[in-house]
Each structure stands twice: as structure tokens, then as C-alpha cells.
Amino acid sequence: MRNETGETKQTISVIIPVKNRHDALVRLLHSIANQERLPDEIFIIDDASNPKFEFDAMKFGILNGQTLPLKIIRFDTTRGPGAARNTGLQSSTADYSLFVDSDCVLPKDWTQSALKAFSRNPKIALLAGSAKIIEGNRFSGAVAMLGYPAGAGLGFQYMWKVAPSGQTDHFSGCCFGVRMSSYKAAGIAFDESLGKAACEDVLFSKQWIQSGKTIYFSNEFWVWHEACNSPIKFLRWHFQRGRGAYFYRKKGGSILEGLQKRLGTLRASLMASGPIEKPVVFLLFWTQVLSQAVGLVFEMIAANTYSRSDFTRNLSRVKDSIVPS
């Protein structure tokens, strides 16, 4: 695409998977309308919301005096975040596709920051961003110190390895961008068999790196993310991650490797926490481990692949990973 002066203009798509969070979606769209650099197309991928989302693209296509190039794609049945992201990538006609979750809000320079990062470094095939938490309560503050989501209060670089150049091996699904030429060359997609919103970004990261493509982190590319304000939401969140871990394991991923990485971040979480937060953060860390373990066993039992001997063997492996012999 060329601009008014005849120069080649790099184009941007924003892709938003959504399910049952339409109040949050409208808030997100307002922040898109406030961007210093508006996207060239916006895809809302509605994953069979219930009740059905009656979204009038014409009504909401003009926000804050800006005309938004909205395109809405609806699924008739729930297909999960992997399918939503794949549909967005397949529909995009832009040079770069930027992903954001529906429960986020964008800073004004979000699209511009991504475009600058891609333009400065042609080696970036996938751009990983981070998240800051929208004001919550003390509980959500403690959760954020665990690094959820996308680094949150702890920092992305304490959750995953980041080289001085910015190169890393992971991204968070709530904030990332893809150079579309690299995506087409890689020939891979998000695994749609995972179904639930858990581990699909971990599996894609692994396959992306294996395909020879790069992931770079930029601390200038970030979103405001809704806080996790309640223990029930926290437990459900990690139970779901445990269920996703079962399918990740079936695809060749290592659950114990993930646990060892999180154990490595626990020290950073405790060091970054205040004296009152420290015991809460410590308790939440082991609560998340337990919740994920319950989710994992739940899926294994549902698939009739779990036995008492499996439990004993896996418990021994977890103990060895925590206290090496």
C-alpha cells in the first residue's frame, strides 16, 4: 500500500479473539480508536459467544471521531483461541498482524511501537510484548508478582530468558505481533486441538523456533491487562492451564521443564515483593502448582489414561525437580 506521497506504507492488522466479554471488547475498541497510528484492518474473531454477540459493526465502527475498519468473523461452535488466531492470520492482508486479548486496553502508541520494532530490526519474525495490570486490589497485586500475565508486576524478562539483543523463546498470547512474510514462510499454525485457552502460545513458540524463525521481546510493546481480583478466578485460571498442559504434553511438551522454569522465577517474585506480600506470593505460587496439577489429572482421568502408578511416578518426578538428588 502507498500513502498520499507515493511512498510504500507498511500495513497493520489488529486481531482480537473474543468469547463472552463484549463489555470489555467495547472498552478495547475505544483504546484502538485512540491510537496514534490507526490499524489498517481490525478483525474481531467471535468464538461462538453465548448469548450471541449482536455487534453492529456500523454502530461501533466510528469511535472517538475515528472510523475503524472492523471486520467480524463468528464461529457457530466453540473452536478455541488457536482457531481464532489462525482465522485472524489467514484473513489478514497486512504486513504485520498484532494480537491483543479482549480484556486488555492499549496505550496510545501500541501500534506505533510494534511498527517501529519491526522496522528497526528485520530479524524480528515475531514480536513479544508484555502486560501491565489495570488497577486492582491487593490480591491481584500479589498475582501480578508471579508474572501473570505476560510478565505483569514481575517483568517478562524474569519469566522467560531474554538475551541482551532482545531475542527470546516465548511470547504471551495477550500481546504479540507477527511479520506476515515470516508466518507464511514458516508454514505452521496454532494447534486447534488444544481447544482451551491454555498452553497454545507455549506450543506455538516451540514450533516457531523449530521452524527457524525468531522471537524478539520489546519492553516498549505492552498492553494494560484486566486484573485477577478474586481467588476463584485465580484457581479457575490455573486449573484451565493444567488442562491445557495435558494436551501440550501429548504434543511432546515437557511439563516438568515448565515447572522448573517457574521455580526459577519464584525467587525473583519473592525478592520483588514487599514484606507483607512475600508470604501471600509464596502461598499463591504453590496454589497455582496444585491447581494446575488438578487440571492435568482431570484431563488424564477424562481420557482414561491415568492410574495410581502414574500418580506415584509423577509425584516422584515433581519431588526430584524441586529437590534434585
Image (cartoon, rainbow, N blue to C red):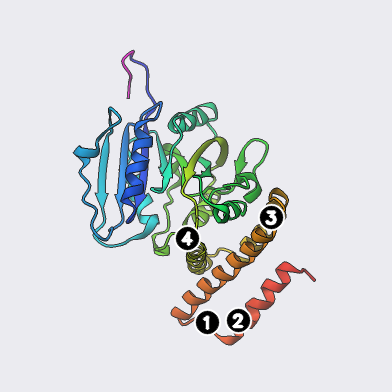
Vertical placement of 15 versus 247: above or below? above
What secondary structure is found at the residue carrying circle 4?
Answer: loop
Give the residue at mark 4.
198
Taking depth in this image into account, of 169 and 156 the one nearest to the observer is 156
Residue 86 appears in the figure = no
Q: Position of residue 294 (x, y in %)?
A: 54, 74
Give the residue at mark 3.
276
Q: Are marks 1 and 2 in contact (CB under 8 Å)?
A: yes
**Which of disc 3 and disc 1 is earlier in sequence?**
3
Q: Quadrant of the C terminus?
A: bottom right
Assess disc 2: are there few (<14), some (14-19) or many (≥20) residues with their C-alpha within 10 Å of its C-alpha.
few
Give the residue at mark 1.
306
Of badges 4 and 3, nearer the viewer stands 3
Which amino acid type is shown beneath numbered disc 2? Phe
Q: Seen from this angle, which residue lies furthest top?
A: 5
What secondary structure is found at the residue carrying circle 3?
Answer: loop
* CA–CA distance in space, label 1 to label 2: 8 Å
The residue located at (48%, 76%) in the rendering is 298
Q: Where is residue 18 in the image (x, y as percent from the top left)?
A: 34, 52
As drawn, the label of residue 105 is none
What secondary structure is found at the residue carrying circle 1?
Answer: loop
Is residue 4 in the magenta section? yes
As drawn, the label of residue 311 is 2
Q: Main secondary structure of the magenta part?
A: loop
Span shown in magenta: 1-5
